[in-house]
Amino acid sequence: MNGEELTEQETALYDRQIRVWGADAQRRLSKSHILVYGMKGTVAEFCKNIVLAGVGSVTLMDDHAVTDSALSANFLILPDENLSHGKTLAEACCDSLKEFNPMVHVSVEKGDISTFGVEFFEKFDAVVISCCSLAKKKLINQKCRKLPKRISFYTVDCRGSCGEIFVDLKNYKYSKKKLEETIECQLEYPSFEDAIAAPWKALPKRVSKLYFGMRVIEQFEDIEGRNAGQTSIADLPGVLKLRKELCETNSVNESQVPDALLERLLIGTSEFPPVCAVIGGILGQEVIKAISGKGDPLKNFFFFDAMDGKGLIEDISKPRHS
């Protein structure tokens, strides 16, 4: 959309949304540009949600070839081999997303996201990455933070019945209504690197065990030089050894990272579609909030575990030294 005002066609199409969050919020959405890296099931759910909401454009990145395993949780990939043969995951998903809302520009960018310079990210309002190594998460987050404009940054990971979202909105200002008055609010977000550097002992006692479990698996993959999700139950002895070391370093009892949880995270290399729907729905909601300026944004981790059906928000930051 080139103009400032919504067109008659857009107003008609997004009528129900405009009634919920107003024309100004819909205008901001219609001018926004979203970069998405890693086209697995959770991200497919997210993309469907923001395309239907009416963002301006979505750029997809994932050069992996379409395989049978990709069909298990990604509904954007059609099972017809003739339609997806020879295509990358991004290309196959792009074709399907265009049909959800022809008013949203959906395109594919090829290449390894970690090799792109800082200036590449400047044209986007939000960057969402999935299936990334620890090093890649830190790197992309740093590049987004170096730019003068605020770029909303998100990581999302889904392992079997568990999922995690991380949010970095830098210095985020928004307004919300309380009774009859409008209140101006401001939140300071840490980078991904700073957030996970928070000493475990300094965190609240009831912090989600999934936070610790995800950090152990993440570090194990990093140390072993694995790609995200390249684990199996055969890795359990090495993971338990690393957990012991991390718990000793952080002066935390090993019961904070139960064996059973680590086993589930190791085995859960494929996604569970109902969990994808939950995590993808929450992520879509958060990106829409950040762009539209409507609603309290999540700060800064969200965890979901289908075993108990609970979704938990955790504010995890490295303590500031006075």
Image (tube, rainbow, N blue to C red):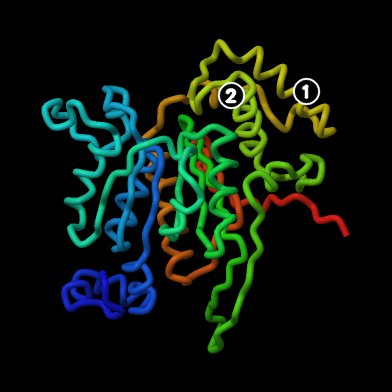
Quarter of the image with the N terminus in it? bottom left
Q: Residue at x 54, y 14 (%)?
A: 233
Q: Is residue 177 above or below residue 161?
A: below
Q: Earlier in the sequence, mark 2 or mark 1?
A: 2
Q: In the rendered image, which quarter is residue 178 located in?
A: bottom right
Q: Give the left or right position of residue 228, taking residue 15 as reference.
A: right
The amino acid beneath tag 1 is Glu
Residue bearing mark 2: 221
Q: Residue at x 27, y 49 (%)?
A: 107
The amino acid beneath tag 2 is Glu
Q: Are marks 2 and 1 in contact (CB under 8 Å)?
A: no
Looking at the rendered structure, which numbered label has been put on residue 44? none
SS class, disc 2 = helix
Residue bearing mark 1: 245
Q: Is residue 67 above or below residue 275?
A: above
Picture coordinates of residue 79 (x, y %)?
18, 29
- Residue 120 vs residue 214, the one in the foreground: 120
Picture coordinates of residue 47 (x, y %)?
33, 49
**What is the residue that sits farthest to the left in this orientation?**
82
- Crowding at dot 1, Cα within 10 Å, few <14 / some 14-19 / many 20+, comes out as few
Q: Residue at x 54, y 21 (%)?
A: 226
- Crowding at dot 2, Cα within 10 Å, few <14 / some 14-19 / many 20+, comes out as many
- Residue 201 vs residue 191, the one in the foreground: 191
Picture coordinates of residue 8 (x, y %)?
17, 78
- Residue 117 vs residue 262, the one in the foreground: 117
Q: Give the Cα separation between the discs numbered 2 and 1.
A: 15 Å
Picture coordinates of residue 194 (x, y %)?
70, 47
